[in-house]
């Protein structure tokens, strides 16, 4: 069946994409932390960074060694950033807004101005994330209908993280 469809490498995700920083399979029902997401994103997009990079965050000592290189690579690529207080908050659950901004940056899509039309179906989009949400919507990273609103300030589960990473790789 796969042979008839063509190259199976383009059809199947790399199995290690579902393995987290501690070697465990991502729990699809649990919320994903910011550090965990950056680790998965760096793996999916094959980001390489300076392993000797000193992370610029006030809480850099809280970033586990298993994700430190991934966070550094994402920072160097301009994909991941910290908060206005200088922290990264590695253990905080990642929100849909943060995840969307990082995926749009990783995909290197030109940022699109947010309008009522390209934000249809999205709730609670923080002002700073509106253009990222609009860009993701226009590129069909995800869609939301009137009965299925995406709340951008809500944490993202492992299942949604995996689906969006796979969709991103498909759109890459």
Image: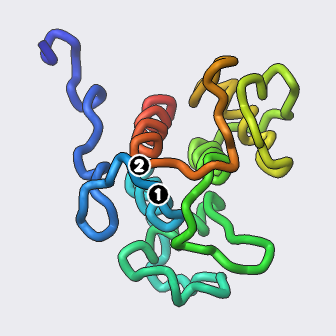
Asked if residue 44 can be seen in this view, the reply is: yes
First along the sequence among labels 2 and 1: 1
Q: Is residue 32 above or below residue 35?
A: above
Please name whichever residue, 159 or 15, is drawn nearer the observer in this view of the structure. 159
Q: CA distance from mark 2 to mark 1?
A: 6 Å
Taking the spot 64% from the left edge, 19% from the top edge, the residue there is 147
Disc 2 and disc 1 in contact, CB within 8 angstroms: yes
Relative placement, left or right, of 76 versus 51 is right
Q: Is residue 137 above or below residue 42?
A: above
Residue sitting farthest toward the front: 147
Asked if residue 105 can be seen in this view, the reply is: no
Provide residue 113's location: percent of width, then percent of height.
85, 34
Q: Can you identify the residue that label 2 sits on?
A: 158
Q: Can you identify the residue that label 1 sits on?
A: 32
Q: Is residue 51 above or below residue 167?
A: below
Q: At numbered mark 2, what does the secondary structure look like: helix, strand or loop?
A: helix
Taking the spot 65% from the left edge, 82% from the top edge, the residue there is 57
Taking the spot 15% from the left edge, 17% from the top edge, the residue there is 2
Please name whichever residue, 107 or 100, is drawn nearer the observer in this view of the structure. 100
Mark carried by residue 59 = none
Provide residue 47's location: percent of width, then percent of height.
45, 59
**Label 2: how many Cα within 10 Å (few below 14, some 14–19, many 20+):** many
């Amino acid at each position: 069946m796969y042979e008839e469809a063509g190259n199976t490498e383009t059809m199947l995700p790399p199995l290690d994409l579902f393995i987290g920083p501690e070697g465990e399979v991502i729990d699809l029902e649990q919320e994903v932390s910011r550090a965990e997401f950056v680790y998965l994103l760096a793996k999916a997009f094959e980001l390489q960074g300076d392993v000797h990079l000193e992370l610029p965050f006030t809480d850099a000592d809280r970033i586990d060694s298993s994700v430190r290189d991934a966070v550094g690579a994402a920072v160097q690529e301009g994909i991941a950033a910290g908060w206005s207080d200088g922290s990264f908050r590695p253990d905080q659950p990642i929100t849909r807004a943060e995840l969307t901004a990082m995926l749009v940056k990783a995909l290197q899509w030109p940022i699109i101005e947010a309008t009522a039309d390209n934000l249809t179906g999205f709730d609670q989009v923080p002002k700073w994330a509106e253009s990222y949400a609009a860009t993701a919507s226009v590129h069909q990273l995800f869609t939301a209908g009137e009965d299925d609103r995406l709340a951008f300030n809500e944490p993202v589960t492992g299942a949604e993280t995996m689906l969006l990473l796979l969709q991103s790789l498909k759109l890459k």
